[in-house]
Amino acid sequence: MASIHAEAFAGPHDAPWSAAAFADLLDQSGVFAVESPDGFILMRTVADEAEILTLAVRPGARRAGLGARLVGEGALAAAARGAVRVFLEVAEDNAAARALYARAGFVEAGRRPGYYAAADGGRRDALLLALNLAETLP
């Protein structure tokens, strides 16, 4: 997971997670992953809510539907664990991720001003997105 995350988050604004960070997260209650050879989604469920912690797809495998498949499978897995809503934060300027989540049915539920550090020393806002599973799953 750490190697895929490093490839997926190799930009100047990114901070890939270490193998130790993934191991620590996966040891926590409610944390699970849906994996493929070229990507994964890492999520956490607490009570009736789920959170997407990270979604990573190797650059060479992008634009082939893998991200959408992982989001869909993650939502199904979260629902199976009792979640009725899924949340995530995404950088306001991450147009590709925002489009992916919009296609999956996520809507803006809030904003976290200055949530992400920018390479130039500034801050970028995060959008809090939510998905109501009862409205989107069969």
Image (cartoon, rainbow, N blue to C red):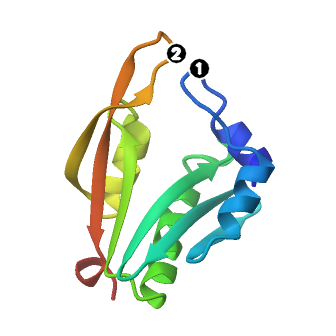
* Residue under the image location 43 percent in, 64 percent down: 51
Q: Quadrant of the N terminus?
A: bottom right
Image quadrant assignment for residue 30: bottom right
* Residue under the image location 40 percent in, 34 percent down: 94
Q: Position of residue 7 (x, y in %)?
A: 72, 38
Q: Position of residue 101 (x, y in %)?
A: 36, 55
- Give residue 12's mark: 1
Sort mark 2 into few (<14), some (14-19) or many (20+) by Cα contacts within 10 Å.
Answer: few
Q: Secondary structure at mark 2?
A: loop
Above or below for 97 versus 32: above
- Say which amino acid is labelled 1: Pro
Q: Is residue 38 shown to the viewer in this render?
A: no
* Residue under the image location 28 percent in, 62 percent down: 130
Q: Is residue 113 shown to the viewer in this render?
A: yes
- Say which amino acid is labelled 2: Ala
Sort mark 1 into few (<14), some (14-19) or many (20+) by Cα contacts within 10 Å.
Answer: few
CB within 8 Å, label 2 to label 1: yes
Label 2: which residue?
119
